[in-house]
Amino acid sequence: MPADRAAIEIDQVIKRFGDSDHAVLALDAVSISISENEFFTLLGPSGCGKTTLLRMIAGFEDPSGGDIRLYGESLTGKLPFQRPVNTVFQSYALFPHLTVAENIAFGLEMRGVAKADIAPRVDSMLRLVKLEGFAKRRPHQLSGGQQQRVALARALAPQPRVLLLDESLSALDLKLRKEMQVELKRLQRETGITFVFVTHDQEEALTMSDRIAVLSAGKVQQIGSPEAIYDRPANRFVADFIGETSFLSGHIAAEQLHFGAAGSLPASVLDRQGDGVAAVAVRPERLQLAANGADGTGLQGVVSEVVYRGVDTVYTVQLADGQPCRVRNTNSLGASRLADVGDRVCLTAQPGAFHLLQEAS
Ligand code: ATP
């Protein structure tokens, strides 16, 4: 469990690259507090500044403004090796000519750990990442997933207080990646080390993190638990970037949420009260699809696309007011198709299913 104590405080950090005429503002007054023992993820699209932020915590880049503190102490002026921080890179960066054991021992030797203490520490790291029996192999004799484990063992061996992971799973195939997601979470739990994980993969972030900071164009868009970010996105960017979302424009009046010719739903489908023009976001799994005209309630539309995905089926419905909206239905055995392209259907929603976006008046 993450403690209340802050391990890392990123305080109004600014990063500019280049000279004043052609400067890129990679980070724009970013403030994040990461707790001790937390699995914290920096999530955002390519170019949002997440790697730059990680590199600044590691000491490979200096902030142009603001401060980064580790357990209350400013990191300004501290070289990478003077920080109780270690990094696992996307490329693993293993030494090809050294064995697995020598790779893991490398960081310990560099830090002056006594020779007698190195072998037992290497053994315990091999056990931790489940690579007992691989000590004498060289990196080219390992699979991608095994190399990843060695890179983790090497980074964890010196017992850093913080482990930084930069897109560490992106070189693995999907199945291995899912296995390593569970594995990383276990390693974090067992070691109690604060993990700061960088990814552009929202599913990965939701699966593994205690908390997530969503970044876009150098700015923090939202910080919160996976549930908070998924269920209560702070703005349109977050709602769009995390999970599947339909954005609709409606009108709230007389306890109803109206969608023109498509009809209306009771205002209880909204997650908070509002009035007038409403920009709403809704997850496909929070809607239900029914044959048209069952009891006359719900939003009317025509199915324009059906995508079968095994576990579920996603229907795109062209609502009668012209707006497209997606509905996801979990498939049960023998009943995987609720409607076909061209069918007239009706959508209903659970209470609170529609998230009223902040920008709505
Ligand atoms: P990706 O997922 O593609 O790695 P990212 O979110 O990690 O992206 P950064 O690598 O942190 O993004 O880059 C943020 C911005 O800063 C980008 O616009 C990038 O082009 C710019 N940038 C990063 N490093 C430098 C540099 N050394 N010189 C100039 N601009 C840079």
Image (tube, rainbow, N blue to C red):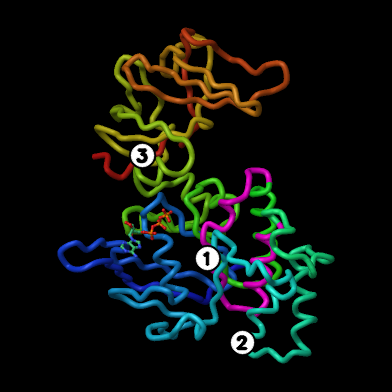
Q: CA distance from mark 2 to mark 3?
A: 53 Å
Q: Is residue 325 above or below residue 219?
A: above
Q: Is residue 180 left or right of residue 300?
A: right
Query: Circle 1 sits in a helix, a strand or a loop, which is it?
Result: strand
Q: CA distance from mark 3 to mark 1?
A: 31 Å
Judged left or right of residue 122, residue 268 is left
248 horizontally vs 346: left or right: left
Is residue 218 shown above or below 57?
above
Residue 3 at least partly seen: no
- The residue nearer to you, when weighing 123 against 292, is 123
Using the image as rendered, state which of residue 244 and residue 46 is in the foreground.
Answer: 46
Label placed on residue 111: 2
Screen quadrant of the N terminus: bottom right
Q: Quadrant of ligand 1?
A: bottom left
Numbered disc 2: secondary structure: loop
Image mark for residue 109? none
Total label count? 3
- In the picture of the structure, the residue carrying the numbered disc 3 is 356
Look at the image and say whether residue 297 sits in the magenta stretch. Answer: no
Q: Which residue is mark 1?
A: 196
- Which stretch appears magenta? 146-175
- The quarter of the rendered structure image containing the C terminus is top left
Q: Is residue 41 left or right of residue 191?
A: left
Residue 64 percent location from the top left of the image: 28, 74
